[in-house]
Image: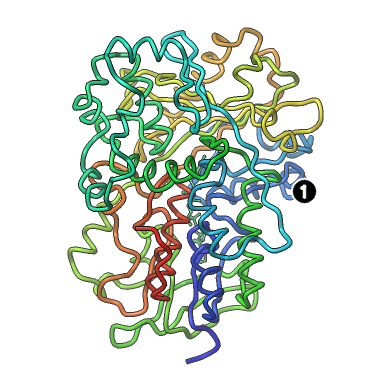
Amino acid sequence: MGKWDVVVIGAGVGGLTAGALLAKEGYKTLVLEKDDRLGGRAMSLRGEELKEKGAGWYRRLLAGQYSYLVDSSPALEKMAEEGTLDGYVLDLGYHGVSVAGEGYFARLRELIGGYGSREVVINPFLTGSWINGDFYREPPLSESNDLDEKIKAELKRLNKRFLDFFGDLMSLTPEEASELDRVSLHDHLVKTGFAESPVLYDYFRCIGTLITTINNPHDISIGDILRYSSQVLAPAILRGGKVYVGGFTRDGVMAWSEAVAGRMRDFGGEIRLGARVKGIQLEGGRVKGVTVEGSDGEEDIPAGRVVFNIPVQELFEYVDEGAFPADFVSRVRSLYGYGSLSPYIGLSDLPVPEEHAKRLMKTPCVVPRSEGFDWDVYMAWNIQSYIEPGCSPAGKHLFTAYLPLTEAESHNRELVMKVVRAVPDFLEGLYPGFKDCIEWELYPVCVKLEGVAKSVSQAGSLKPDVKAPGVEGLYFAGDTVRGYGVAMDCACSSGILCASAITGVDYGIG
Ligand SMILES: Cc1cc2nc3c(=O)[nH]c(=O)nc-3n(C[C@H](O)[C@H](O)[C@H](O)COP(=O)(O)OP(=O)(O)OC[C@H]3O[C@@H](n4cnc5c(N)ncnc54)[C@H](O)[C@@H]3O)c2cc1C
């Protein structure tokens, strides 16, 4: 039927995962990517690129990944002109890698036999919480008995252990996890008795929001958290050594995509950048190929299988919805994501104590819900350059953070600006002198941080399957379809499930 067994549309984390595994199994695989680089929402840029290509280029790059710049200081045009970002490496928005890459990323690395000659360095960070004016130190995941004394005292008061939150993880079956997908974090905290302590409630809410990027504890699915804990965190801890909540990638998060893409090419796969797919062709309920536009004009590429890595909500722009069962169409149309504000702040000095600088810090409320939000807006922040010094010029520091917003909130500039204004004020209150160290600020907003929110109505097993119903040969990969865990890891796990559905190989996740 032509040169390719499989065409993958999109070189995001999900598409590259599926592409690398398919190529490894001997499928002739082509990945088509509309942008000039890999990684999709997990892409990176060099600060010099802003000077070389201009403010319009940066705005278009954001727009191509469901993002926009809501504010900056100085103006973006001035930053481009003056090379303000020279020497920095920025991701599209804040990108910590969960479990410092020892989750589904590690499973994929194992399945593709490592990255060949390429290196992916992920520097781990510790975590901490800032709740009602108190600092709570958190140990690595593998040392959960070394909790902050204040948390220990609160647990003792309730006669509970920290691990009671997770239950018997080692015996959690996939069926039980799927049932728990519909249970909220709030209900779980009430059931387990942790809700009796306001501090523990906020503490676990911070953990829940970190994993799901949802502010509202009534909407956060506990199934997704417990499945990830049992399938990814617990096994990583049992393997021995220190296990961290997350880490930052040297040379930007895109280094991971480049390594996986390199591996795919090692296996004979091909990737075309600057190739925008316009439509998927069908014949008699089967996939026939895709139509792509590139620098040489339009081209039809035949293939019997197509993997759609674009967020599934956009499917009907590529295939007529009449090809699918009606219940699938209405399900896909009802899916919603979660957005975020991702402040980037260049600092002339380090205005943060080392105890905080070495951690991802999180706090349950930077802007209260009474300001018009669905729930109190949480913030997670880092001095990224303290963890991964290569992301800022020598002697300077890079502050990065994310504040989850609902999809609707993230589209509302007025609401978002309330958050933008609150961030430096919050930081100045916590770290006096912070504002004096600010050299520049960039406030990108993403409306699909997580393509499908891990909420009680959509998490894990409740998402669309990786195999399309009604159309033979059409598959999905990415964070909007079946897949588990934190965003990039979720996209990776979905790519593994997608490859499994095509090759029939059981890769051991479910
Ligand atoms: C600001 C921000 C912060 C985030 N922070 C974190 C974090 O800290 N930790 C974490 O784990 N995750 C984070 N995420 C989420 C993570 O980036 C995503 O969950 C993950 O990258 C999604 O991967 P994907 O493969 O599902 O989709 P995508 O990355 O969306 O990939 C889809 C690909 O398809 C391409 N494409 C689209 N249309 C076409 C077309 N017509 N033809 C060809 N190609 C096309 C796109 O350019 C893209 O490359 C963040 C995301 C954002 C935006």
Q: Which residue is mark 1?
A: 52
Vertical order, 115 against 140 (above or below): below
Q: Residue at x 56, y 74 (%)?
A: 24
Q: Residues within 10 Å of mark 1 (few under 14, many from 20)?
A: few
Residue 403 vs residue 421, the one in the foreground:
403
The image quadrant of residue 306 is bottom left
The image quadrant of residue 247 is top right
Q: Residue at x 60, y 64 (%)?
A: 113
At which x and y percent is residue 154? 34, 11
Q: Residue at x 73, y 39 (%)?
A: 80
At which x and y percent is residue 374? 30, 28
Vertical order, 404 against 319 (above or below): above
Residue 194 vs residue 449, the one in the foreground:
194
At which x and y percent is residue 168? 29, 38
Vertical order, 288 against 259 (above or below): below
Side of 313 where 343 appears, left or right? right
Q: Which three-letter amino acid code belongs to the residue tagged 1? A: Glu
Q: Residue at x 39, y 32 (%)?
A: 209
Side of 190 where 503 appears, left or right? right
Q: How is the image coloured?
A: rainbow
The image quadrant of residue 149 is top left
Quadrant assignment for the C terminus: bottom left
Label 1's element?
A: helix
Say if residue 105 shows up in the picture: yes
Say if residue 64 shows up in the picture: no
At which x and y percent is residue 241? 57, 38
Q: Which residue is farthest right? A: 394
Q: Which residue is farthest bottom? A: 1
